[in-house]
Amino acid sequence: MGALPRENPGGCTQEPLETLPVCEGVLVLLNEPGMRDFVKAALQQHFARIDTAATADEARKMATETCYRFMIADIRLPGGPRGIELAQELRELSSLEMDVIFITGCGDVQDEIDAMRDATADVLRKPFHAEQLLALIKRAGDRRRTAREIFLRDRESDQRPVPERIVGDSDAIKDLWRTIRRVAPTASTVLIKGETGAGKELVARSLHDLSGRQGSYVPVNCGAISPDLIEGELFGHLKGAFTGAHQARNGLFGHADGGTLFLDEIGEMPLGLQAKLLRVLEARSYRPVGGNQEIPINTRVIAATNRDLAAEVLAGRFRKDLYYRINVIDLRLPPLRERKDDIPRLAEHFLTILSAELGVPKPELTAWDREQLIRYDWPGNCRELRNVIERSLLLGKPPSCYIAATDPAGTPDRPVTEATPRSLATMQRSHIMNALLAAGGNKTLAARSLGISRKTVERKLKEWADPNLCDTGTLDG
């Protein structure tokens, strides 16, 4: 665990335990040279780019040349605008949303109140420790990822009519649609089971849109939020509930009142929070962090997992009572290898939408391409198929060029054919290892390219029990 952080293409060096978010850079705008040096030293091991400025003019010049995701600034700047106005000005120079941490003194009370009205800003009072600054940066990164995930998923789903979301004519998909239409109007809790990339999110969104519920559809990935933040994300908090809680905040359960809350990867939820979720499902009310009063809700919960939750219960990693509570309606989404007749239609679907998005001509699939697509087992399911189609459109080569695996002997990039059969476990191992090699050994980047969590990659490496692979100094993300 003593490995040095590695730099990734995003411009941010990451700790071995991935405690800080990826970003383009940090702009430090502080009056005092000693304070600038202190903040830069505190962030040096976490970020590859840290620019410092002493005046607003210097900060403006830097913002025209670099796109910053974080700014740490004095709330009062001598001889210029307040830090709040400057932050808004710099945001307008950038195409990305910039999170700001304002540094204040005891006499800046009104400025501090004004800063609190900014949803993407936090305030840190002097004096402070480096750990406090890093905690605020981490919280801002988690907050931004959650908001982006909700926005992108809602936007993608809203663009397609419900019948077009899950593509396929196989018997398994027809049975799935019959069940979706039957249970959608009910208020029953649904558990969607399926492998990574199979389309569990599409099923959840379809259940909501066919339910007739007037409230919002709110998805949250339980594995993407750190355990110390997820309770506040779900239930919200009151002002003063913890250090830095300067104002009350509504949680995702509150946002989904009258609608649907989709708990993706519920198997990643910490055990302590599982007990609180069970109580919410039973009582139909929740209690914000730091509060004593129960708030009633009318929220339908849909959960999804790629794990065997029954096995997780036996292993003591998931509560039995919660498992029975969420498993009222059990929907299994079949993996792509079990509905291979749907693969050509799915490929055509992805070719149509991606060629339009990328602005390139839509090519025709050859008989050879169709045959190779059907033969491949697709351990990454629909997400992997989409990635292969997108890669082929961008690079101008047939999809069959990108269906490859590494055999146990180590021969790379050999096409999968009937003459080279492989078990699913071997294919999965090859796929993850190819992603790790492509990412230079960075587990985080490899997990993102595969559409799975970093924890999944680490768990697989431990299962294969190869000390060269499990060594965090060799493959560190």
Image: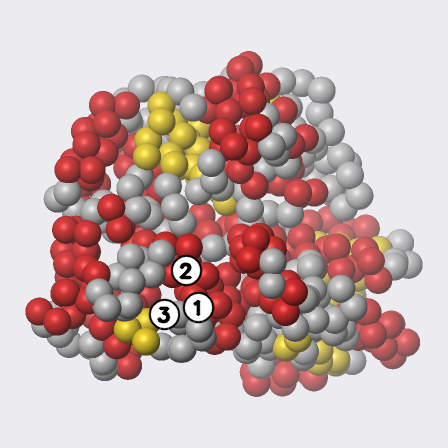
The correct choice, above or below, for 459 with respect to 70 in the image is above
Instruction: Indicate the position of residue 98 as horizontal and vertical percent values.
Output: 59, 65
> How packed is label 3: few (under 14 Cα within 10 Å), some, or many (20 or more)?
many
Amino acid at dot 2: Thr
Q: Which residue is mark 2?
A: 426
The correct choice, above or below, for 405 with respect to 121 in the image is below
Per the model, the C-alpha gap separating discs 2 and 3 is 9 Å
Q: Is residue 172 visible?
A: yes
Say whether marks 2 and 1 touch (CB < 8 Å): yes
Per the model, the C-alpha gap separating discs 1 and 3 is 10 Å
SS class, disc 2: helix
> How packed is label 2: few (under 14 Cα within 10 Å), some, or many (20 or more)?
some
Of marks 2 and 3, which one's residue comes earlier in the chain?
3
SS class, disc 3: strand
The quadrant of the picture occupied by the N terminus is bottom right
Q: Which residue is mark 3?
A: 405
Q: Is residue 419 or residue 223 the one in the foreground?
A: 419
